[in-house]
Amino acid sequence: MHKPKIPQETPDFSLVLGGPLYQLYLRSHIAQPPLGLIHRRILAITLIVWLPLLLLSALGGNLLGGDVKVDFLHDIDAHIRFLIALPVLIAAELIVHQRVRLVVRQFVDGGIVVPEEMPKFRAAINSAVRLRNSVVLEVALIVLVYTFGHWAWQDQMALQTATWFGGPGLTLAGYWYAYVSIPIFQFILLRWYLRLFIWFWFLWRVSRLNLRITATHPDCAGGLGFLGDSTHAFAPLLFAQGALLAGLIANRIFYGEQTLLDFKMEAGVLIVFFIVFILGPLCVFTSHLARARRQGAREYGAFAARYVQGFEDKWIRGSADEQLLGTGDIQSLADLGNSYEVVRKMRVVPFGLDDVIALVAATAAPLLPLALTMMPLVDLVGHLLKIVF
């Protein structure tokens, strides 16, 4: 007598819900569970970090013109940072929340995690949730922002010339910029890095489980192709990173007497780094995929040999009495060939070239307008058309 199969409860997991900042959102009524009122959060945080800079710069005479090389309205880096990159980072929470939840469910709904491993799978989720909700980790981020983060911005990122926020001393607007606006932005950015680390930690723990990988799955990734698709949810984060670099380079070009070509190494390294940063952790499933491909090739190869031998014995060398037309043997042979071809093309990473291209495009897109500093728009469009066509 067979025991009835106990249905598996599909766990629900969000990468962005929870944590002290999320609780602050709820208590200040700029969020409704789970992530409603996103426009209110974007407006409120942007006004806190950007509007005081506008008003204080006007009071200090550095809003437009003045005795500084770079006034507030012409600081490209500041406006891109707070009016483009920051809203994108905030809006990305909703996208990641919706996509990652589906990814976690797919491990169960797609039969990747076998029933015997469900307790360990739930333990991995619980561990990720504890890290996501950790007060200690977010406090550590604040400490990091006001120590290393402040030093990195002041010594490495800020323009070393007279600007609206100061040089060498800080203006009133500069104090708000250095101790409120920049730390808030850095905290939100580092918090995203923390969330990504939690996500990669979760994937690593799942990769340690006994997973059911199907070599003939049509996604050519053993059924894990959804992981490659899920990386598109992080494209806004890469776009924000590209925007940050674009703003920094723009200031150096217009006010630092440098050219776009002076930053080709930085741009290339940034793009490669973040592509590896997002896709690299998915390689924890490579051993599963490689083993499934070897086993699939071996098993389907042996099965195909037996089937082809039987087919030839029946239809080529034998004297089959059946009519050739309409027989299912030929269709079965074709289906077997298709299955073997899927096994042969199976990847050992759960992502493809399309996923790489999508992330590269998201990171590089904010840098493209800077090409106008090298050539007129008409010439740039002409070069792009030649590349495409």
Image (spheres, rainbow, N blue to C red):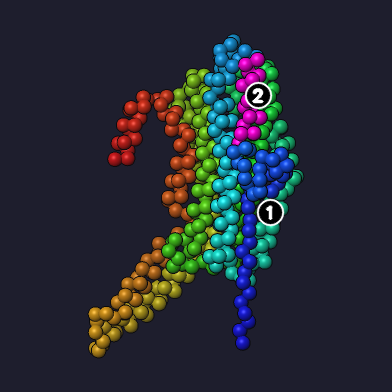
- Nearer-the-camera pick, 85 or 199: 85
Q: Amino acid at mark 2?
A: Pro
Q: What residue is pinned by disc 1?
A: 129
Which mark is on residue 22? none
Q: Where are the magenta residues, as a range? A: 42-59
Query: Where is residue 178, by image quadrant?
Result: top right
Q: How many marks?
A: 2
Does the magenta portion include 51?
yes
Give residue 273's position: percent from left, percent from top.
Answer: 53, 42
Q: Estimate how packed mark 2 is, as few (under 14), some (14 to 19) or many (20 or more) residues with alpha carbons within 10 Å.
A: some
Q: Secondary structure at mark 1?
A: helix
Q: Which residue is mark 2?
A: 52
Q: Position of residue 132 (x, y in %)?
A: 68, 49
Quadrant for the C terminus in the image: top left
Residue 251 spot, x, y in % from top left: 52, 23
Instruction: Choose top left, top right, bottom left or bottom right for residue 21.
Output: top right
Q: Using the rendered view, name the quadrant where residue 161 is placed.
A: top right
What residue type is disc 1 on?
Val
Q: Residue at x 63, y 23 (%)?
A: 53
Is residue 177 toward the left or the right of residue 362 in the image? right
Residue at screen point 27% across, 80% down: 326
Gap in angstroms between the C-alphas marked 1 and 2? 36 Å
Tag 1–tag 2 contact (CB < 8 Å): no
Question: Is residue 283 something that shows in the picture?
Answer: no
254 is within the stretch colored magenta: no
Q: Earlier in the sequence, mark 1 or mark 2?
A: 2
Callout 2 secondary element: helix
**Whether residue 261 is situated above or below residue 311 in the rendered picture:** above
Which circle, 1 or 2, is nearer the viewer? 2
In this view of the protein, can residue 385 be seen by the observer? Answer: yes
Between 88 and 310, the one nearer to me in the picture? 88
Residue 50 vs residue 198, the one in the foreground? 50
